[in-house]
Amino acid sequence: MFYFHNYCIYVAGLIMKMRLLVLLVLGVSVSSCGDSGGGASRVDTIAAMQALGKNIFFDTNLSSNSNQSCASCHDPLVGFADPRVSSAAPVSEGSEAGAFGDRNAPTAAYAFFSPFFTNTTTHTTPDGTVSNYQGGQFLDGRRINLREQAKDPFLNPVEMNNADSATVVTKVSNSSYADDFIAMFGSGAFDDTDIAYNNIARAIAAFEASAEVNKFSSKFDDVQNGTATFNDSELRGFNLFKGTKAKCANCHTVPDTGTILFTNHRFYNVGTPSNGFNPAVVANSSFIDNGLGGTTDVVVPGDEAAEVGKFRIPTLRNIALTAPYMHNGVFQTLEDVIRHYDLKMQFATAEVNSNIANEVAFDDSSLGLSPEEITDLVSFMETLTDQ
């Protein structure tokens, strides 16, 4: 009972933290955060902004052919990932037929909790793998926060394919929710294209910060709050996940306190092999995705070689829903992913052979996971699916 009480306090604190962070996204003063003296109006402002952002998020008219929305590639029914992709078709098709990028769309759920992109701290895993960068959005961290990330897909020719930001602003001004946009941002909300476009992104970011996108409603959460228990396989899997044999928690961390997101938000090369079905590889067999090391606009000059092949560690929440896996969608099942880590680099060639994390580096041995242990790990990860 004492543990349940403490968990309720933790959840209440998490909700307050989310509200404060959303207020920062909205640009609303947080100098007074109580329920009195304007606190309720701030909560109302958050709710209105999130509702506006949801309308924008699901609006297919905001693509060049009115056939794609943010939700097309981040569908809530599959953990805010793309239900149309697989390891053999790993990249989402854009608004233009036949237009493809070169990466598997990551989940949008829990992206809100990724810290702003930074290189101010160095982190070393228990196995000695060093990471110098953390956070940001996209798999390579190239946008500092959700607001900046939300601006890119509208203009990307292999995604929503709008000609420019003015086109997007015009479409929003003609939408069924245009009055809500004006109510939020004022009578001149559409007068300045740059300001309006920034506010469109702010609204999307606010929705992505909402409890609808970040539910914390999985069986794992129920176990944490004392209203459910793991079965034997799930419990074995959880203990294995946290232990030194499987090493999952080296990067997909499980802190003793605070929000458990199953990621440290850092960048590693985990030896992912190339995916021959990736449209970029089909077009050019020598294609290599350099990850963080290829984002010269965010990596400190001179650091590029040390960051080649590294991608941000994703949350594992809803992981059972978000196949295929890895930045290029090369693995279709969780069992495939675990076997990749279990065998280390013995039977696979990494897309990028430098900077490989010590946890998966070739050392004449495997992790030695049994078939039952692989099953147990999957059973545990299936408890991370929101209800």
Image: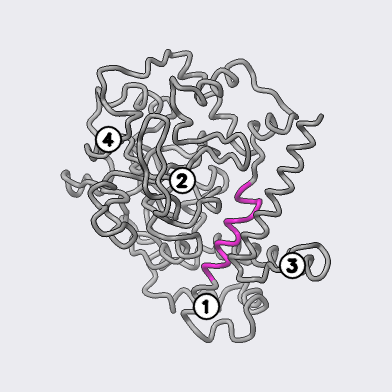
Measured in 3D between alpha carbons, the distance from the residue under mark 1 to the one under mark 3, in whole angstroms, is 27 Å
Is the residue under label 1 in contact with that under label 4 (CB below 8 Å)?
no
Nearer to us of marks 2 and 1 is: 2
Measured in 3D between alpha carbons, the distance from the residue under mark 2 to the one under mark 1, in whole angstroms, is 30 Å
- Residue that carries the numbered disc 4 in the rendered image: 273
Check disc 1: other Cα within 10 Å, few if <14, some if 14-19, many if 20+. Answer: many
The residue type indicated by label 3 comes to: Ser
Q: Return the x and y of residue 281 as percentages of the image width and height.
A: 22, 45
**In terms of secondary structure, where does tag 1 sit?**
helix
Q: Return the x and y of residue 49 as percentages of the image width and height.
A: 65, 67
Q: Give the range drawn in magenta.
A: 200-214
Is residue 188 highlighted in magenta?
Answer: no
Is 26 located above or below residue 217 in the figure?
A: below
Dot 1 or dot 3, earlier in sequence: 3
**Is residue 32 toward the left or the right of residue 132 in the image?**
right
Measured in 3D between alpha carbons, the distance from the residue under mark 4 to the one under mark 2, in whole angstroms, is 21 Å
The residue type indicated by label 1 comes to: Ala
Is 86 located above or below residue 161 in the figure?
A: above
Residue displayed at 26% across by 48% down = 290
Is the residue under label 2 in contact with that under label 4 (CB below 8 Å)?
no
**In terms of secondary structure, where does tag 2 sit?**
loop
Q: Return the x and y of residue 42 as percentages of the image width and height.
A: 73, 67
- Residue that carries the numbered disc 1 in the rendered image: 196
Dot 3 or dot 2, earlier in sequence: 3
Choose between 188 and 305: the one closer to the eye. 305
Nearer to us of marks 3 and 2 is: 3
- Residue that carries the numbered disc 2 in the rendered image: 265
**Is residue 13 toward the left or the right of residue 339 in the image?**
right
Measured in 3D between alpha carbons, the distance from the residue under mark 4 to the one under mark 3, in whole angstroms, is 51 Å
